Amino acid sequence: MGMGASSNTTSSSADPEIVAIYPDPVAENDQGEFVELIVHSSTSSLVLRDDEGAVAVSNTTVQGRVQIALDSSKPPPTDGAQTVGTNGTLSLANTGERLELVADGRVVDVVSYENARSGERYISTDDGWEWRPRGATDLPVVESSHAQATLYAFPGGTKPVVSSLKSATDRILLAGYTFSDPQITTHLIEAHRRGVTVELLLDGGPVGGMSQRQARQLDRLVAAGVPVHILGGEQARYRFHHAKYAVVDESAIILTENWKPSGVGSRSSRGWGTTITNRQIATGLTELFRADRGWNASQPWSHYRRSASFEPSDPIGDRYDRTVDPKTVQPNRTRLLVGPENAAQSLRGALTNATSSIRVIQVSIGGPDGPFTTAAIAAARRGVSVRILLSSEWYVRDENRAMAAQLNRRANRSDLDLRVKLADPRGRFEKIHAKGVIIDADTVFLGSLNWNQNAAENNRELLVMMEGPSVGRYYTTIFDTDWDGKKKDPLPVGALIVLAVLTVIALWIARRISFEDRSE
């Protein structure tokens, strides 16, 4: 929500009104400030003023959405609105401002704000005034009760992902935070060569910098003719493009893992993923891809590369071959959730409505007062059984140990059925990277959303929610195995069959050996 307040004077529905303020552009010296109006009908005089100055709109015959550019040297991109010039001087204060809109000598609207957020607009919504990244989308929740979902986990989820890419006949729209897996690169190039439309959309400023391995893979793709788009720079509307997904024909791949060897390459991380076959979900994800690729912050890889520097790559670890078989099910309901529009709100709502159990797997949870942790603690106070499994990897180990101890002490003092622990991989994987939640054993959330305020409010994130006992059972089995710290994952069905065959052969050989020994 916004940190200011708005109050309107007595006015008619035909009067112009202020609908957005952009007081703190990312550009130097705040170049590009503007105020956006809705002008319902022409006026003879239109003035915007604060306590220190005023500007008059030089052309009052405009109508509809109008942006008043307060700095003529750097007018803002229009965002679909008409930009008009001004006479006078007005500068918006980053610490707060009270603006009056005067039409034909009469104050028709008054808006105030406090503590402007860099690169964000203060906009009027149905729920009040809010700070939102400039150009932020307002995508709806996409829902279907007719989807088919293939469920899988990493390590091991590489096979169903690769299978989807290899079977593509029409399109592959791949989006991510980082991308550096050579195998995925090869399959994308092969798809492009057989006539599939292939595009990539990636973050241009990941934490720690972009790796040399990623640069090599993107060079390979562009050299083969695959368009690669990079998001970042002054016009970026989200702090990080953190979503991890792909649209493949009429299917949607949604992952907790990055497109790199340690993630989708099954070389390191415990992660969750799903491939959903459903036209509505695929269409919703395509709209997300197009909206982000089409924004001003998107640039071709060739342009980005000219001034970029790259960091040394981490070594590629060994593949973890002990995996759980994928399973294809039909969820009772599937919902595509986008952040910051509706993903965090939907997850908090589900945690708030939990009645029996909550199971959480996360790299870390940031703190006891985070938006999701507080909802989980509140659920425990209602009698819900809560289990939170965190990563034990070196870069979060101390933080997670302290957090687990703090929350476990709180649970013991208040007699809550709440337990937090660090994962013990025991050779099944190297580290936890999954971002998953199981609620009441039959509702699963998975995707890119970390449990912290920044992810909830400032990043482009993606979650899928699937309802149904078959979905819940699949991920609960994996969660329980990781929670218990068992030496090995549950054996996949295929492995059980192979084991049975090998056992029969071994018994037959043993009998032959025994017989031959006796014959001597």
Image (tube, helix red, strand yellow):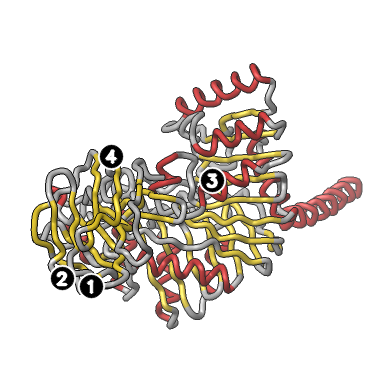
Q: Which mark is residue 62?
A: 1
How far apart marks 2 and 3 lie (CA) works out to 55 Å
Q: Nearer the viewer, residue 415 or 34?
A: 34
- Do callouts 2 and 1 mark residues in contact (Cβ within 8 Å)? yes
Residue marked by disc 4: 115
Q: Earlier in the sequence, mark 1 or mark 4?
A: 1
Q: Earlier in the sequence, mark 2 or mark 3?
A: 2
Mark 4 packing: few (<14 Cα in 10 Å), some, or many (20+)? some
Please name the amino acid that badge 4 sits on: Asn
| Disc 3 secondary structure class | loop
Residue marked by disc 2: 59
Closer to us: mark 2 or mark 3? 2
Q: Residue at x 15, y 57 (%)?
A: 70
In the rendered image, the vertical position of residue 295 relative to residue 101, given as above or below: below
Q: Earlier in the sequence, mark 3 or mark 4?
A: 4
Task: Using the rendered image of the protein, determine whether residue 165 is visible from the camera's viewpoint.
Answer: no
Please name the amino acid that badge 2 sits on: Asn
How far apart marks 3 and 4 lie (CA) works out to 35 Å
Quadrant of the drawing holding the N terminus = top left
- Do callouts 1 and 4 mark residues in contact (Cβ within 8 Å)? no
Q: Residue at x 60, y 55 (%)?
A: 465
Closer to us: mark 3 or mark 1? 1
Q: Earlier in the sequence, mark 3 or mark 1?
A: 1
How far apart marks 4 and 2 lie (CA) works out to 31 Å
In the rendered image, the vertical position of residue 80 relative to residue 17, given as above or below: below
Q: Residue at x 52, y 75 (%)?
A: 249
Please name the amino acid that badge 3 sits on: Ala
| Disc 1 secondary structure class | loop
Residue 114 x %, y %: 29, 40
How far apart marks 3 and 1 lie (CA) works out to 51 Å
Residue marked by disc 3: 434
